[in-house]
Image (spheres, rainbow, N blue to C red):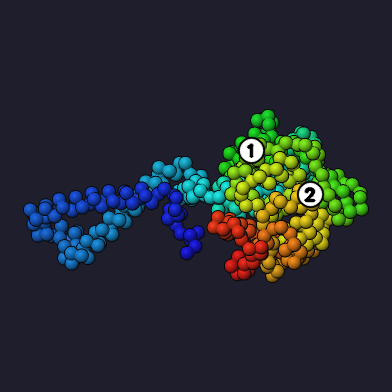
Amino acid sequence: MNRRRLPRWLYPGMRVKRWLVLLLAGIAILGLGAAIYIRDLYRATNADEIEVVYWLTGAWLEPQIRALLVAGFGVLLTGIGLWGLARSVISPFVARGDSVMEVLYTKRYLARGPRIVALGGGTGLSTLLRGLKGYSANITAVVAVADDGGSSGQLRRQLGIVPPGDIRNCIAALADAEPLMTQLMQYRFPAGSGLDNHAFGNLFIAAMTAVTGDFEEAVRESNRVLAVRGQVLPATSVPLNLSARLASGRQIWGQSGITTAEEPIDQVFIEPGDVRANGEAIERMLEADMIVIGPGSLFSSILPNLLINDVADALRAAPGLKVYVCNVATQPGETANMTASQHLRALFAHVGDDLIDCVIVNRDTTARRPEGWLATPVEVDVRRLEELPVVIIEEDVIDPGNAHRHDPAKLAAALMRLHQDDRIDRSRPRRVSRPVSQAS
């Protein structure tokens, strides 16, 4: 049975059922005592001979039917009273539009979920987080900080802060008030407003940085103020500069330059190369049950995190399951024509082949392909993948309406199945392929 269809208060670990049972037991015992007294009173006064009492108590019915009706009426009144009492007492502490059980579910059940760290940036990471937050509140998003374009790049140059754009996307994805929070954080001011093209969320984080005096503290307070389910952390408190060497030997600089490269990328670099990682992010990685790398832009979102020495060392030492989620579509100018095995080989070439246990690749080829998009589906070259030291997990993780995007719910469900399998037996086969119908 799918427990997601159960009423929230029936979920294990909610700490509601035990008190409800105790309350009902107390009411039952109280009712039993009252019944004994009323029975004796009936016998002493011959109350059934009083016409009003006769009709109100259903004395003309069979005793068994009469008992069931009275008991049912009592249960109904008790339930209504308890529900009304709970709403009256707890409603001042519950956000408008939420139910009491929804809040209890979030605080109790999701708090017992697996500890997951997600590494990446861009829209891929926010897509992953949007799905994962339905399974756990113990999520930590470690976000790349190398963006140098758009609103983030402008704030970076003007204020000298870490680019907030990808962090904004992740906070919006994990916020309890989504999708309203997403609309607010992603709102861009119109041209001529003096804040042209700036996203509200970027300005919010920039203002919080000015108030707290520290970018990491600003992000931490933003998590709290915006009721984020989990936490979002910058990979480092120092803005990173990206550069790349192309196959021809030519150098290009900046994340925005890498995303528009016109030839294959041979290697990417971060500057400063000896930057220290966020200490809290490292702690979360070492405590995690699962670390998820991607999806996201391979060279401009994923590798900037892994090229931080502290992050790579923590990933290597972490005891949790390490999973790479391969993109479902190529990115023109960055990963054009690259297959799934080439994505993984490029990652290994930068950080070694001992950091990842599993790779999730998409096996559904029926999704609709958007017209006019230059990207193409990533070819899953299984034979080449089997040459690499990873377990291949084939799942349907694609958005059926857009073959260039992961589906948040499908991807999260696939990761949770993998986590459950890992808890049972880590000596899994080299390749796992699930039917499309099961994954969807």
Q: Is residue 273 left or right of residue 36?
A: right
Q: Secondary structure at mark 1?
A: helix
Q: Which residue is mark 2?
A: 350
Residue at image position (71%, 57%) is: 389
Vertical position of residue 266 compared to residue 314: above or below: below
Query: Is residue 7 in view?
Result: yes
| SS for dot 2 | helix
The label shown at residue 36 is none
Q: Name which residue lies at 61% across and 49% down.
A: 320
Q: Count neighbours of disc 2 (C-alpha within 10 A) and say few if under 14, some if 14 to 19, many if 20 or more.
A: some
Q: Quadrant of residue 48?
A: bottom left
Numbered label tally = 2
- Front in this rendered view, residue 348 or 149: 348
Tell whether 23 sits left or right of 383: left
Q: CA distance from mark 2 to mark 1?
A: 24 Å
Q: Residue at x 62, y 69 (%)?
A: 435
**Relative vertical location of residue 28 with respect to residue 435 in this rendering, above or below:** above
Residue type for callout 1: Glu
State the residue at coordinates (64%, 34%): 217
Quarter of the figure that contains the C terminus: bottom right
Residue 61 percent coordinates (x, y): 18, 66
Residue 277 is situated, as x and y percent measured from the top left of the image, at 70, 38
Specify the quadrant of the image occupied by residue 427.
bottom right
The amino acid sitting under disc 2 is His
Q: Given this view, does label 2 or label 1 mark the residue nearer the observer? A: 2
Tell me residue 122's x, y (percent): 72, 49
Mark 1 is surrounded, within 10 Å at the Cα level, by few (under 14), some (14 to 19) or many (20 or more) other residues, namely some
Give the side of residue 10 with respect to residue 363, left or right: left
Q: Are marks 2 and 1 in contact (CB under 8 Å)?
A: no
Q: Which residue is mark 1?
A: 280
